[in-house]
Image (spheres, rainbow, N blue to C red):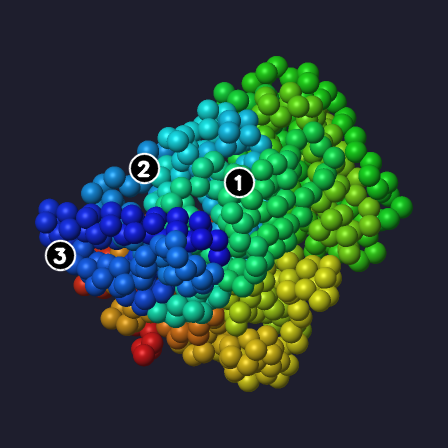
Amino acid sequence: MSRIVASAAIRGAHKVVGECEAFIERAVKEKGKEAAVEFPETAYFLPMICALLGEEVKQVGDMLPILSYTKGLLHEPPGDSVWLPYLGHTLDAGIATLFAEEMIVALRYLYGTEPQPGCNGFFTDTIMRTLGIQLVDGRMPGFAAILGAAPDTKTAVKIVRELQKRSILVFAGSSTNGTSIIDQLLAENVQMGWEPYIVPYGRDTVSAIYPLDWAIRSALTFGGLRKGQARECLLYCKERVFAFGLALGEVDDLKYATGAGAINMGFPVIADTDIPQILPTGITTYEHLVKERDYEKIVPRCIEVRGVKVKVQEVGIPVPYSPAFEGEVVRRESMHVQMGQKYSRAFEYLRMRDLDEVVDGSIEVIGPDIDTAEPGGAMPLAIVVDVAGRKMQKDFEPILERRFHSYINMAMGVQHIGQRNIAWYRVSTETFQKGFRLGDFGKILHYQLHEEYGKIVDKVAVRLYTKLEDVDRLLPEAIVGFNERDARVEGMTDESVENFYTCTLCQSFAPNHLCIISPERLGLCGAYNWLDGKASFEINPRGHNQPVAKGEVVDASKGIFRGVNEAVKLYSHGHLEQFTIYSLMDTPMTSCGCFEAIMAIIPEANGVMVVNREYPEMTPVGMKFTTLAGAVGGGQQTPGFLGIGRLYITSRKFISAEGGMKRIVWMPKMLKEDVRARFEKRAKEEGIPDLLDRIADESVGSTTEEILPFLQEKQHPALALPPLM
C-alpha cells in the first residue's frame, strides 16, 4: 500500500479518535456516564461496534472501554527510514476510524445536533426492511456513498443521474472546501429521499459512518449473523453487499481513514483526483483504491471496480428510465398534466386475447395527446393492453396488470398511483418538455411486458383513449373483468391445488431462508402470492419460484406435508427439516428480513399480537418492532414468533392450528385500519363480526397489564381458547 495513503489514513484515524475522546470526556462531564446514547429505530445499538466487537453501547459510560480498544488499534504513520508495504496498520486505522465516527455521531444525537439540516442522519432498521425486497430481487443492485462535491452542480447531477439510471442507491454527503454534493443537488432542484434513490446523510465526513452502518446491519438483519462475529460480518459485506465509495474533490486525511474502514468491509474507493492507486486485490474483490478523472467514465468505472451487476434499460423514450425514479413525486407546481383521481376519469386494463387478435407492437393514441392539454390541467385516460401468448393464462392477467405501477413509475418525471379504475397519472413539465407523450406509456408497457414476461407473452398491443366518451364506453367491460378476477382468486384454497411454490429470492441475503407460498398464504414480504409463483415458474423454470408437490398429508391441521418438508430440507441446504404452514408454535416458517409485520405470542393473554414495521413504539411483549425483527430474521425458525405479509392476517389459514384470527389480541391502530375491510368480512365468517373492536391497540395500552382488563371486558375469544403454551 502506498506510503502516502498509509500515512494519510493513519493520521486521519489519530485525528478522529482524538476528537472522539474529547467528545466522550465532555459528555461524561456534562451528561454523566449513565446518559443514554442510541440511534433511532434500531435493534443493533451502535451497529458497527455491535457487529465487530459484540458490545452493546447503551450509555455514555459504555463508550470508555470501546475508546480504549480503539486507541489500541492505532499505529504511528510510516517514517522516512524503512517502509514495508504492509496493509495491517492502515486497515486497523480504518476500523478505529469507524468506531470513533460511530461514537461521535451517537453523541451528536445525545446533544441533538443530528441529523443535520436537510439530511437523513442514521438510517433506521425499518427503512432497511422496507427496501428489503428491492435489495434481493435486483431492482437495487448496489450502493454508492459519495463523499465531497463535484467541480460544479451540473457535473454533480450528471454523476447522480448516471447512478440512478443503473438503479444504484446513492448516499450523498461529506464536503470539499466547504461545499457538499447535497447542496449542489439542491441547487439544481434534484429530488432527494429514499424513493428516488438519493439519500443525503450529512455534510461532514464523520457522518459517512451512516452508509457503512447500513451495510454492516445487512449481515445482522438478513444474514442471520450475531453480534461479535466480526470476520463473518465483514466477509458478508464483501460478498453480498455491493457498495463502493466515490470521493469527489480533494481526499484529505479523514477521507483516507474512512476509506480504509470501507476497504475492510470489501468496499473499494474511486476518486476523481490524482491520488495514489492501490491496484492489487485481496481485501476487496478487485482493486482497492482507483482514480478516474473523466466524468463520462467515472460511474462505469465504479461499477466495474466493485463488480456490480447492472442493467440499463433502453426503452426508447425521451427521459431516463430506471427503478431509481419509481418513487419520484410529481408535485402540482411542477406538473404538466394529470389523469385520474378526482380530476378526471382514468383506468388501466390488461386482457388476454387470441394470437390472431393482437398485432405485436401496435401502440395507438385515440384522441388528443398531452400536448393539447392546458399546463397544470387534467384529461381522461383509458389504457387498454391486449396480450397474447401460447403459454398465457387468464389467471396471469392481474399479475401482469399489477406491474403497470412499477413500469410506468420508472420513467423520470412520471408518477403513477393506484390501479384498475382508481389509477392516477402525472407527467412533469420537464418530462413533457423533453418530448414525452402518451405513446411513450405504450412503449414502456410493450417493452417491459416482453422483457419480464417474454416466456408467456408473445404479443402486446396498447391503446390509449383520451376522449371521455371512449373511457366511459370501455370502463364497464373492465369492471366486469376486475370482478371476475377477484372471484376467481378468492375462491382458491390450499386444498384446491396440488402444488405450492418456493420463493428463494431472499437467499441472496439470507442464505438458508425460504418461503413456501400457497393460495392462502402469501410470501412474508407481501409481494408474492401463489399466482405470482406460478407465473414466475412459467417464465423461468429454473428461477426462484419452484413448484412443490404437497405429497402425503402428515398433519392437516398444522399444515405438515411430506413433499413440503422434502423441499424445505433441500432449499434450506439441510439447515431445516420441517415447516408447519398453519402453526405459529410448532416449527413455523423462517423469516428473512423483508417481512411486512411480525406476529408474537402474548402468553398472559393466551393470544398473539401483530405489529407492522411502520409502527415504532413499544409493544406488549416488551420489545419494539426493530428488536423483535432482530430475533426473528436471518432465516431462523423461532416458535412463537413469525414474520408475515399483512394480507395473511385475513387468510382462512392464518395460524389455523392455534385458532386463527381469534388469537389476535393486540395490533397498532394503523394496522387495524389498513386491514379493516377484509378483517371484518373474515370475522363475520367466524361468527364474531365485532372482533376487530375487541382487539386492543396502543390507545388501550402497550403492556400486558394494561391490555388484559380491556380483553376481559370485551370478552375476547382468545381468553376462552385452549392454552397456547
Instruction: Describe residue 128's horizontal placement relative to residue 108 as left or right.
Output: right
Which residue is label 1 attached to?
274
State yes or no: discs 2 and 1 in contact (Cβ < 8 Å): no
* Residue 451 location (% of width, % of height): 74, 49
Which residue is label 3 attached to?
34
Instruction: Describe residue 100's horizontal placement relative to residue 218 as left or right.
Output: left
541, above or below 467, in the image = below
Which residue is label 2 attached to?
116
Crowding near pointer 1: few (<14 within 10 Å), some, many (20+)?
A: few
Return the residue nearer the eye: 535 or 678.
535
Numbered tag placed on residue 600 in the rendering: none
Crowding near pointer 3: few (<14 within 10 Å), some, many (20+)?
A: few
**Mark 1 or 3, nearer chain start:** 3
85, above or below 677, in the image = below
**Mark 2 or 1, nearer chain start:** 2
Task: Please tell me which residue is depicted at 51% across the width and 79% down the height of the picture.
Answer: 575
